[in-house]
Image (cartoon, grey):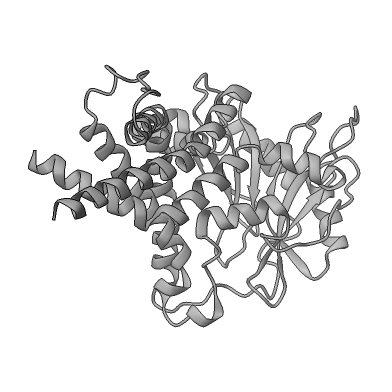
Amino acid sequence: MSMRKSLHKGHGWLGIIFMIPFLLICLTGSILVFKKEIDSLLLPEVATLAPSDAPRLPYDTLKDRVNEQLPDYEIGSWEIFPAGHDEADRVFVIKEGTDIWHKVHLNPYTGELQSQPTEPSHYLTDWLVELHYTLLLNDIEWLEFSFATEHLGLLIGLTLGLFLLFMGVSGLIMYRRFWARFFTLRWNQRMLVVFSDLHKMAGTFASPVLLVLGITGVYYNGLIFYEEWTEHGGGQEHHIMTERLYSDEVNIDTLVADSRERIDGFKPTYLLFPFEPELPFTVFGRAPTANPLLSNYGSVSNYDAFTGDYLSTYNLNEQGVGMKTLDAFRRLHFGTWGGLAVKIWYSFVGVLPLLLAITGTYIWWQRRNKRARRR
């Protein structure tokens, strides 16, 4: 009883304290489940391609076309899609003399850019992604007096993920027999009872997805912060792009073809160019699998930046349950593992915290007033 009372108190107070940022993250996530569809609707001439039976141009030709059209930028990474796909390739470039990344959309059938370089939060959905992960609190000039404050948004996102885990687990502990009265909604009772039933019903329905989002969100925010800390926590600056960090003689088509040979049935999806000294070319992709939870980026092959020589391969199918579980976090977090039905489910659950916030605040306020009257 003492533990349940403490959980009640912590559940209520933390819900009040984190309500606004938590709602922002949930509501933006609910929208971003349909990022591809929104981009296609709002940016049809930028993000999508006209139907075409033509083959994709060779990767090396496309690379040269990008470099010709953007002489003041260097390619950092490149998201590729198979022939016949309706999305334009997304190429991420770094402006020379800076460490700032930009995004362009590339038509892989003509080699023409469908957009000019834009910073990551330029388009509406990209701005929502930035709001979702950092609440727009990273890299604020007046906060840049320590590593932690420069990455304040990531830390808040990590904290909110932990908060979500606590709220889900504590709610299920307090309402241990949730299955017995899951469909009970006493409309004919006083408002406190109705709101209590709504709160329990919505929380129980949403808890599986919210717990998954909490776990995966904590993992990704923690991983990004850890990588930034290990690479730049001692004050090390990000690499300023002043020159091309790979040889133009390296043929990208040869690397992609070799990656297919290293893993039978391998489908390349993402090319990572050397954007810092001593980094290799990396071809990401999906190894054949019947598991819908495994991502399109789980297997990789690495190549020397100046000779193109093969270095190593990581085949996700050869890894254990732990690595496959971590890879599955991507699809689990974004809701891309089960088609439109799962997207709708995730989006609906993303709106439910608004109902939880309203009913939870009302319950907390009424109980607070009741205690005050007793005193």
Q: Residue at x 15, y 47 (%)?
A: 6
Q: Is residue 101 visible?
A: yes
Relative vertical location of residue 18 with respect to residue 47 in this rendering, above or below: below
Q: Is residue 110 left or right of residue 308?
A: right
- Work out whether residue 87 or residue 346 is closer to the camera in this orientation and state it: 346
Relative vertical location of residue 94 with respect to residue 267 in this rendering, above or below: below
Q: Is residue 258 left or right of residue 324?
A: right
Q: Is residue 210 left or right of residue 30?
A: left
Q: Position of residue 289 (x, y in %)?
A: 52, 22
Image quadrant occupied by the C terminus: bottom left
- Work out whether residue 286 or residue 58 is closer to the camera in this orientation and state it: 286
Q: Residue at x 78, y 39 (%)?
A: 40
Question: Which residue is situated farthest in the front direction here?
Answer: 373
- Work out whether residue 272 or residue 45 is closer to the camera in this orientation and state it: 45
Q: Position of residue 130 (x, y in %)?
A: 58, 57
Q: Residue at x 43, y 40 (%)?
A: 213
Question: Which residue is situated farthest in the left direction here?
Answer: 2
- Work out whether residue 99 or residue 157 is closer to the camera in this orientation and state it: 157
Q: Position of residue 88 (x, y in %)?
A: 79, 42
Q: Residue at x 27, y 16 (%)?
A: 180
Quadrant in the picture for residue 32: top right
Relative vertical location of residue 117 with respect to residue 293 in this rendering, above or below: below
Q: Is residue 250 visible?
A: no
Q: Position of residue 139 (x, y in %)?
A: 54, 72
Total labels: the figure holds 0
Image quadrant occupied by the N terminus: top left
